[in-house]
Image (tube, helix red, strand yellow):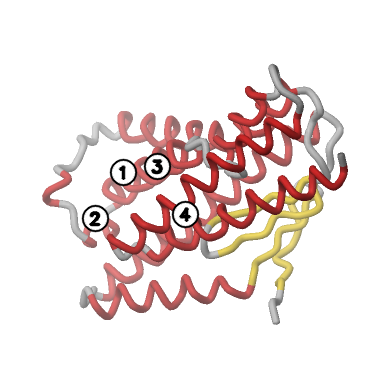
Amino acid sequence: MRKIFHLGSWLGIPIKMHSSIVLTLGLLAYVIIVESLTTAQALGFAAYMTCLFICVLLHEYGHALMARRYGISTQDIILTPIGGIARLNGFPNKPALEIMVAIAGPLVNVVILLVVVGVLKLLGAGIPNPELVDYSIFTHPIGFLYMIMVMNGLLFLFNLIPAFPMDGGRIFRALLSFWFSKEKATFAASIVGRGFAIAFVAIGVYNKILVLVGVGIFVFFAAGMEYKALHRRS
């Protein structure tokens, strides 16, 4: 039975955590044991994972606050092992506004990235050699900031993949809505989204990236469910 834990509210939007988040703790413990991390490395990596969820939360607040600007409230934001979900009470009917709501989340990651880049420049820090990067990077302030920068760059790029109902998929659906009905645009976006979902699962299984497998499964079923829900309303 699934359980949702309330973490509080910020800017009038409840923040919740799905009980399956314990899988992340399991992954953290697995990495610490398998990689034989030192205490400092383990604490640094745990802090990095915490920052990851904070960045994901801010990403979802980007969607929520942009939706609020257009009169759409947010039921809550739920944190899960595969990311965050801002449960909006609807989406703008106009494609241009839907694009604004969808792109707001990734743009938050760009802002965080630029802030970190600015801090690194002020500190006169160089870019580490990727071939020399190991878990010790999380124990140094400069290295830690560098990884936060990389994290937000990856979050921005990954979320723009046109895999409906991810952000990029919603932007893709909104662009199609300029020429087709919303139902037809959603159907096309869901087909493309399921194609990407299958690719996510295949890549995740091949490279043993469980998070990517989870994202792929979620996208595959969510794309179909959202189209069916819209079809019934139509």
In the rendered image, which quarter contains the C terminus?
A: top right
Distance from the alpha carbon under mark 4 to that under mark 2: 16 Å
Which residue is found at the position 56% from the left and 52% from the top? 219
Residue 26 against residue 119 in the figure, above or below: below
Distance from the alpha carbon under mark 1 to that under mark 2: 9 Å
Q: Amino acid at mark 4?
A: Leu
Q: In the depicted view, which residue is nearer to us: 156 or 182? A: 182
User: In the rendered view, does 233 fall on the left or right side of 42?
Assistant: right
3 and 4 marks in contact (CB < 8 Å)? no
Distance from the alpha carbon under mark 1 to that under mark 4: 13 Å
Q: Residues within 10 Å of mark 1 (few under 14, many from 20)?
A: many
Which mark is on residue 138? none
Which residue is found at the position 60% from the left and 51% from the top? 57
N-terminal of the pair, mark 1 or mark 3, is 1
Q: Secondary structure at mark 1?
A: helix
Distance from the alpha carbon under mark 2 to that under mark 3: 18 Å
Say whether residue 9 is visible. Answer: yes
Which residue is under mark 4?
A: 52
Q: Amino acid at mark 2?
A: Ile
Q: Secondary structure at mark 4?
A: helix
Furthest-top residue in this view: 179
Say whether residue 59 is visible. Answer: no
Q: Secondary structure at mark 3?
A: helix
